[in-house]
């Protein structure tokens, strides 16, 4: 991304962060964060990545809610960010935190299984 696209992406992220967090609170979706925004080279499309954690509804259900309010969010971006054309917003679920949790779980399981193997080897050596 060029510098202008990065600046525009940063501004769009700032504008969308609070409304999306509020939308998550209203719909009991837990904590929702705009993790990043990437712009197409012509600044016509904004790819918005949203992370959702700890809600009573599934992340996919929350993404569907975002899709229903997309016109209002785009209008908000158009009023707050000075551009010739308001970019189309495309929302994606950012599952990075889910992947991190899974990796941590696997590492913990591997550590626990190594402890049990070590304990078994010690008891065999003592005999």
Image (cartoon, grey):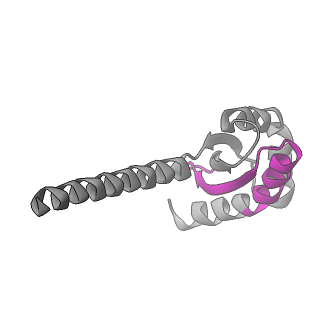
> Is residue 82 among the parts visible in the rendering?
no
Q: Is residue 24 magenta?
A: yes
Q: Is residue 109 magenta?
A: no
User: Who is closer to the viewer here, 105 or 75?
Assistant: 105
Q: In this view of the protein, which residue sits in the foreground, 77 or 23?
A: 23
Q: Nearer the viewer, residue 99 or 80?
A: 99
Residue 45 in sight in this render: yes
Q: Quadrant of residue 5?
A: bottom right
Which quarter of the rendered picture does the C terminus lie within? bottom left
Residue visible at 39% across and 49% down in the picture: 106
Measured as percent of width and height from the top left, residue 113 is found at: 30, 51
Return the x and y of residue 107 as percentages of the image width and height.
Answer: 37, 55
Numbered marks: total:
0
Answer with left or right where residue 39 lies relative to residue 114.
right
Occupied quadrant, residue 57: top right
* Residue 126 falls left or right of residue 56: left
In the rendered view, would you say 88 is above or below 122? above
What residue is drawn where x is 87% and y is 55%? Answer: 79
Image: magenta residue range: 14-43
Image location (x, y in percent) of residue 119? 24, 59
Q: From the top left corner, tell me how far across and down residue 100 is, in percent.
A: 48, 54
Q: Residue furthest front?
A: 127
Q: Residue at 74% x, 38% y: name it.
A: 62
| Left or right for 3, reference 78 | left
- The residue at 67%/33% (across/down) is 60
Side of 64 relative to 126 (left or right): right
């Amino acid at each position: 991304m060029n510098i202008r696209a990065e600046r525009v992406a940063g501004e769009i992220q700032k504008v969308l962060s609070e409304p999306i967090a509020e939308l998550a609170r209203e719909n009991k979706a837990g904590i929702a964060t705009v993790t990043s925004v990437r712009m197409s080279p012509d600044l016509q499309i904004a790819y918005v990545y949203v992370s959702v954690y700890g809600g009573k509804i599934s992340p996919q259900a929350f993404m569907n809610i975002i899709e229903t309010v997309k016109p209002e969010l785009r209008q908000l971006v158009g009023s707050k960010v000075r551009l010739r054309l308001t970019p189309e917003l495309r929302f994606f679920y950012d599952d990075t935190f889910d992947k991190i949790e899974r990796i941590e779980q696997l590492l913990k399981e591997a550590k626990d299984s190594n402890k049990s193997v070590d304990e078994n080897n010690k008891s065999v050596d003592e005999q």
